[in-house]
Image (cartoon, helix red, strand yellow):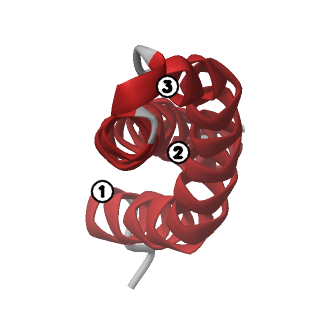
Amino acid sequence: MLKRRLLNIKFGVSQASSALGGLVGNRVSSAVCVWALGLATAEAAGSGALLCTAIGLAGAVVGREIGGASSEDVGEFLGEQIYEATFNDK
């Protein structure tokens, strides 16, 4: 029972890094988009920068997927290490 709880650290780490990945993905993609499309369409009052909302949302989704998937193994490893250090049967 306790081992299962400790292995649930995998879920917590995955969720935290997924949220962080989404935040970073959104900020980076939005900033790049605003600068690129905003400057490219400056003569048209920066109308291309309006697309950055959709691009920022897509960046957040991709960031969440990458962040969550890449951290599952880390969370599982941490949970196993805590379990082994705490309840070593030897």
Sequence-earlier tag: 3 or 2: 2
Q: Are marks 2 and 1 in contact (CB under 8 Å)?
A: yes
Q: Residue at x 48, y 59 (%)?
A: 75
Q: Is residue 62 left or right of residue 20?
A: right
Q: Residue at x 46, y 58 (%)?
A: 79
Going by the numbered disc 2, the residue's amino acid type is Leu
State the image coordinates of residue 40 (x, y, percent, origin top left): 41, 47
Q: Is residue 1 left or right of residue 89?
A: right
Instruction: Name the front one of labels 3 and 2.
Output: 3
Going by the numbered disc 1, the residue's amino acid type is Thr
**Residue 72 vertical placement versus 21 (above, below):** below
Q: Which mark is residue 8?
A: none
Sequence-earlier tag: 2 or 1: 2
Q: Residue at x 35, y 41 (%)?
A: 24
State the image coordinates of residue 9 (x, y, percent, origin top left): 51, 43
Q: Residues within 10 Å of mark 1 (few under 14, many from 20)?
A: few
Q: Real-space Cα distance between discs 3 and 2? A: 46 Å
Q: Secondary structure at mark 2?
A: helix
**78 or 58: nearer the eye?**
58
Q: Secondary structure at mark 1?
A: helix
Q: Residues within 10 Å of mark 2 (few under 14, many from 20)?
A: some
Q: Are marks 3 and 2 in contact (CB under 8 Å)?
A: no
What residue sits right under mark 2 in the picture? Answer: 6
Q: Quadrant of residue 58?
A: top right
Going by the numbered disc 3, the residue's amino acid type is Ala
**Residue 6 vertical placement versus 56 (above, below):** below
Q: Which mark is residue 86?
A: 1
Q: Real-space Cα distance between discs 1 and 3? A: 53 Å
Q: Is residue 1 left or right of residue 18?
A: right
Q: Residue at x 49, y 30 (%)?
A: 19
